[in-house]
Amino acid sequence: MKKKFSFYKIYFYTFLALTLTVIILAFPAQCLSLALNGLNLWFERMIPTLFPFMVLSGIIIRMNLTDSFVKILNPILGRLFHLRRACIYGMVIGFLCGFPMGAHVTAQLYEKKQISKAEASLLLAFCNNIGPVYFLSFVLPTLSLKQVFPFLFGMYGLPLFYGLFLRYMVYQNNIKESSGLCFPKEPAPALLTALDESVFHSLFSIAKLGGYMVFFNLLFVVPGLIANFLHLPENLSRLLTGSVGCLLEITGGIGIVQDSAPYLVLCILPFGGLSCIAQTYSMIKNTDLSITEYVMHKMILTAITVFYYLLTVKLSFLP
């Protein structure tokens, strides 16, 4: 039975690859434009916002400075979550710097043996979200949303409370078992050595992310062709292409949807799209952390977000 399933899987993947190849050859202009858009988004948005944080975070972790970095916030977050300081560092970076820094830092801390597998799984479940700078400077203005606090709570407050629920209801026993473990820290390298290693690994990671953005933006050609085949009006065509696009690559999808369906976009944001999942996998693939578990938590957070916006709109807190 397993061999039969593998047989069908191979043919399914082959069919998808051939179909995409035919589409690229049949519609080269559209595919070139979409791929170029993904490359521009990577160059103009991802590199300036992520690369400096990747380098700095890599230096901090390699030089064992995480405890000092979170010294101010630890009295609050440490008592709230009852986690070691390295975990609080991963949480702070994940929320402040945004996706995929949450997964990147979590994987680094776990590989450097500064946190346990249970702690890494917990962080990965709720700290790998869209960054606040990206959310405030790009998402809200593009969606023409003027209120800030309700949407900030929906984007960051819900994951924070979900993380508290996971900490004390799901991962309580596993983290308790690992809390007494002592993780010996590697000797801190010299600053220039840490900088060199961090720059090298950050360049490799950011280049991979760019590849994912180009590839998933290229897939936007499929819903666009479907909309043209169905002869949909321009507004419906844009909504279909943008909605499917958000599920593929969130930034390109938002650029297409714009303000035509803001709450749809807000409900998709916690999930992040297939590109975000693939990029997260690229961050954790050298560890034994589960991408399936990560996707499950993202789907739960998406369902919670949908309920939150349905409730707030129903109660007239939001237009």
Image (spheres, rainbow, N blue to C red):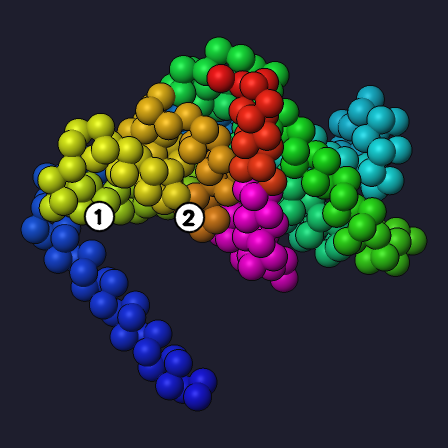
Q: Quadrant of the N terminus?
A: bottom left
Nearer to me, 50 or 94: 94
Residue segment shown in magenta? 280-303
The amino acid pointed to by label 2 is Leu
Image vertical order of residue 9 relative to residue 269, above or below: below
The secondary structure making up most of the magenta span is helix
Q: Is residue 41 left or right of residue 225?
A: right
Q: Position of residue 84 (x, y in %)?
A: 84, 41
Residue 222 is labelled as: 1
Q: Residue at x 23, y 45 (%)?
A: 223
Q: Is residue 303 above or below residue 178?
A: above
Does residue 182 belong to the magenta stretch? no
Residue furthest to the right: 180
User: Measured from the top left, where is residue 88 in percent x and y?
Assistant: 76, 35
* Residue 36 in sight from this viewpoint: no
Q: Which mark is residue 4?
A: none
Q: Residues within 10 Å of mark 2 (few under 14, many from 20)?
A: some
Q: Is residue 86 left or right of residue 255?
A: right
Give the percent coordinates (x, y) of residue 280: 52, 48
Which mark is on residue 274? 2
Query: Label 1 amino acid?
Result: Val
Q: Residue at x 53, y 13 (%)?
A: 147
Q: Residue at x 80, y 25 (%)?
A: 73
Residue furthest toward the left? 26
Lower sequence index among marks 1 and 2: 1
**Could you classify mark 1 by the number of other residues whose Cα lies within 10 Å: few (under 14), some (14-19), or many (20 or more)?**
some
